[in-house]
Image: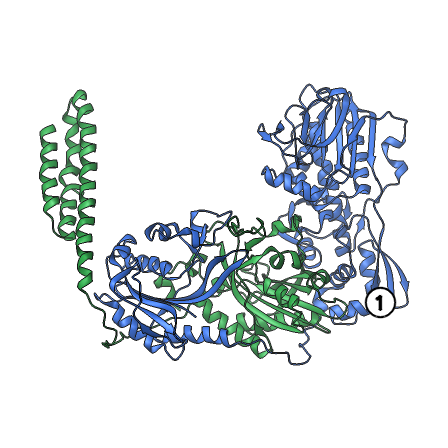
Amino acid sequence: MKVSISWLKEFVDFNISSEELADKLSLGAIGVKEQTQDYLELDLTYNRGDLLSLRGVAREVAAVTGSKLFFSTPKQSDHPWERKDLPENLVRVDDKNLCPVYCVATIEELKIEPSSDEWVKKLKDSGIRSVNNAADVTNLIMLEYGQPMHAFDASRVKDKTIVVRCAENGEKITTLDGKERILDETDLLIADPEKTLGLAGVMGGKDSEVSANTKTILLEAAIFDPAANRQTSKRHGLYSEATKRFQHGLTRTNLLQALGTAIEMYEGLGGKLTAITLTGSLQDEAKTIKLTREKINSLIGIEIPPIEIESSLKKLEFSLAAQDSAWEVTVPYWRLDIQIEEDLIEEVARMYGYDKIPPKELKGELLEKINQNFFNLIYDLRKASAEAGLTEVQTYSFFSSAVLNNLAWDKNNLVKIANPISSETEYLRENLWPNLLEIVDKNLKAGYKDIAIFEIGKTYSPQKGDLPKEDYHLSIALMNGTDNPIQELYQIFESLKNSHPGGVTKDLTDENKYFHPTRFAALEKDGKQVGWIAEIHSRIANKFGIEKRVAVLELKI
Amino acid sequence: MEQKISKIEKDYSEKIQKAQSLKELDGIFLALFGKNGELDLLPKEFSKLSPDERCRIGPLFNAVKQELEKTIEVRRNEIREQSYIKLVDEKLDLAETTQIKQRQGHLHLATQFKKEIIDLFENLGFYQFDAPHVEWDKYNFETLNIPKDHPSKDMWDTLYIDTSKLGVEPGQMLLRTHTSNFWSRLMEKGQTPIRAMSFDRCFRYEAVDARHSHTFNQFEIAVVGENITMANLKYLSDCLLKTILGEEAKSRFRPKYYPFVEPGVGIDSLCVFCHGKGCKICSGTGWFEIAGAGMIHPNVFKLTGQNPKKCTGLAWGFGPDRILMLKHGIEDIRYFLEGDLKFLQKY
């Protein structure tokens, strides 16, 4: 999130440069991706939805710099709708799990105009384009409170009645971006009694968009189920500042404050609040967690003085009730990420200062050994191969489309990727040698006259109902400029004997279509075939663009 | 002009049919399509033609050109197939010994680096543990406290396996996005205390460019036991940084979120390239980010059937490829897996 420094200063009284602030935040609170004199770009994490708002960031700034906040949580009676007796709009929410809170306010007598320079600048500094005064209020509020809002043109909403329901399979909507989208029953919709108005928490509909002629708006502030919202936004490829916030989680207390401020801003534009509906449970559950000194010290590894523990948490607006060497800690409503004692310990540790944790050696008993023979074997084999004059290559775990085409490989026996990035990542390799052939070709084209390479790596074969079988293979490819490279390859292989599992050779019974008609042999271990050595058939080599003779060996380790 | 073209076609078709070697065909190809080849020169004369003629000659020329190219290709394959037949006469005699050519061999840079790191941690009592590259969602995500449909799952762009023919529900099998599956597996096995490590391949749904690859290495350690603390994490971080970057290096913790650890930290190293003064590599800050780590989340203990009240644990992971790039001034990550001998034989 892009945080405008000058706007931030409306919320917290800090007196350090943007550079120092960035340092303090990244060491004590949250990563900073970019820092300029005008803004900070924060590296937001999935647990801290509260930091997707200026107020949330201001709280962290206050905590890490020891400065004062200019705002506090208002009392319920301060909300603008408490001042007068207002009628309600009709709202029907079908599924309280998918939409636990839905609020809508009617604001009349609005005049749609361009926003003031001040608003335009705030939005611009935050990386958002100004649209018009009515739409800008929703974005300003989202930036300040982290609560997304949406304004519908009330004249496009039948009977000013809102229905929050799941779509029917095949139902269609044209979203604000002008695209028609086909929905299914997992998509949550905002609708009126007759038609759809928007994809809940994802994007509004074109038809009910606020236009230059809009006089009355229905202002929506809601909480939608994060997982369902994520599914819908993923399926339609619609990601926005709003979906991000819905998915990170929102709180009721904050929603009501945001709605109150939004209404006041519309009133400032000449609008009149004429109706309001607040549905769902509007109170956040108070959370208390027990925190013990013992647990803090045993996880961090040092004794942190109780007074430091208390002051660390208080800076972050936790409240503590001390009990012996423990505390009953009440979590501020906006900290949805704090669930367990360890979460509190992280807060203590970062506020106390990670730099105060000294290095301590691992102690404890010697452990039961995990057998390392296989790892040692692989390393020894690599080392012996290099000592035999081979250059180690490592290739992708995939078969390229060139490999699959040139070898007309049977794809049925390959592990297939469901969502490949391209045709180059669609199938996992079953052997290593095809990838080595590609590398021989590449280096021949680069002018190499002698190519002796090897790879040790995993191969993959599918198994019904289970993970693929993964085996480590050794493969060697040799192009030594002669018409009979298998001769030297075999000698190289013999020289590795001390390190490989001790294969012997015998004739392969069936001819492989990739091999030279006579130059191939099986490699055996304990009477079982574990691999083969062969000259690659010239027809195959030619397909890869290789005009020279290449011998290859492949062995299961 | 038409006569000229058909004469070329006739003459060369014959020549191609008569050719007996690939070399001969190459000569014919050059005589036709090479610079100043007969077909290469012809279009220069088209300007002299009337528009009417040009309409006729153009398509004819193209057809002949394509036809001749195809004839050469067909003949090339015929000659090749003839030479393949002769392969049967070649013999295999593995008993006959030949001299092995003297070559300077090379271990891949990643293998050398791996050895260095593994040796260090073996001395600290760690053992390597192998885990599958193709993994269940359970070990890559679920038991690591990354539930289904949780937004934090978006931190990893994942390649999934097409399981339609395997009798497995879609979305359950994937290419592991980190090496962490080795310790979620170890924890589930109940082989505690754990002091284990892995240096191996991981995968992400990511287009390949100079700085990104869908296939990359990760080194990760996990320690589970009684009284494992963040102070231990600090010690192990310092050890590792000193080994891979030199004695001057030291670690710094920053708050960072990973669902499988709590507290979670990002680990910076003092920038050894400018001695902490600030340079291009560390963006002027004197530190650069190198690893992610933290204390294993109690949910991971519970999800793998362990008791978080009895043990604590730490995990520490980093991307060796990036460090190798920094250390050796390698500008393109693709060098590691694309087999360029000029690059591989430098080390």
Q: Residue at x 90, y 27 (%)?
A: A84
Residue at image mark 1: A306
Give percent across and percent down for residue A439. Answer: 34, 59
Specify the quadrant of the image occupied by residue A389: bottom left
Q: Position of residue A55 (x, y in %)?
A: 76, 45
Q: Amino acid at mark 1?
A: Pro
Residue A319 position within the rendered picture, expressed as x and y whole percent measured from the top left: 86, 55
Position of B228 with respect to A303 (left or right) is left
Q: In front: A225, or A474? A: A474
Counting other residues with Cα less than 10 Å from the Cα at mark 1, is it few (<14), some (14-19), or many (20 or more)? Answer: some
Q: Supply the letter of whichever chain is blue.
A: A
Chain containing the residue with disc 1:
A
Which of the two residues, A355 or B313, is positioned nearer the viewer here?
B313
Chain rendered green: B
Question: Is residue A263 among the parts visible in the rendering?
Answer: yes
Is A388 placed above or below A26 here?
below
